[in-house]
Image: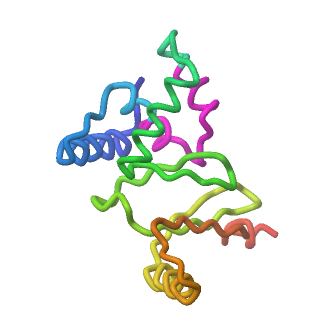
Amino acid sequence: MGFSPRTETLLDRAGVICDGRGARLTDLRRQVLGLILDASQPTGAYDLLDRLRATRDGAAPPTVYRALDFLLEQGLIHKLERLSAFVGCIAHDDHAHAAQFLICRGCGRVAEIEDHELAHALEHAAKRLGFTVGKATIEAEGQCASCAAAA
């Protein structure tokens, strides 16, 4: 299965990140990550499974979910709970970075932002209630600039 040159570059970077952590980006994990990175929109587990079956006869849901669990654990993807789908994130060596997502209701595009002020505001608000935030992913729905211009 061939991926775009951009995706191949990101997959190579993901391999280096995993090696540095003592983790192994197996061929299957690499393929799942490549499918996510090459997708134009967030990708669900069963869509990944359907695409994997084109090249892997024995692909089954546990196969995909194990690969997704590994990729989530390594911080190479994010799960968008609202969409029950996954997006790639190879830009960071810190796999616990704060992430916020803007999801367009019109076209389904997702943009990841990393606003440290927003992350700190959440931490401070939680702290006022005696709560310590371990990990937070914020998802905001709305309309992207392209959809707004078309309307």
Q: Is residue 61 above or below residue 137?
A: above
Splitting the image into 4 quarters, where does residue 46 fall?
Answer: top right
Q: Nearer the viewer, residue 128 or 83?
A: 128
In the image: residue 50, left or right of residue 121: right
User: Who is closer to the viewer here, 87 or 118?
Assistant: 118
Could you say which is closer to the camera, residue 106 or residue 14?
14
Placement of 44 over or under 76, stated as above or below: above
What's the magenta region? Answer: 33-52
Residue at horizontal 53%, vertical 24%? 62
**Which x, y percent locates residue 136?**
52, 67
Provide residue 56's location: percent of width, then percent of height. Answer: 48, 14
Q: Main secondary structure of the magenta part?
A: helix
Residue 11 position within the rendered picture, expressed as x and y whole percent measured from the top left: 32, 41
In the image, taking residue 8 as reference, residue 126 lies left or right, namely right
Q: Quadrant of the N terminus?
A: top left
- Could you tell me residue 120's position as x and y percent? 46, 84
Q: Residue at x 49, y 24 (%)?
A: 63
State the image quarter where residue 114 is shown.
bottom left
Q: Is residue 33 above or below residue 131?
A: above
The residue positioned 54% from the left and 16% from the top of the image is 54
Seen from this angle, which residue lies furthest top?
57
Q: Point out the image quarter for the C terminus.
A: bottom right
Above or below for 95 versus 24: below
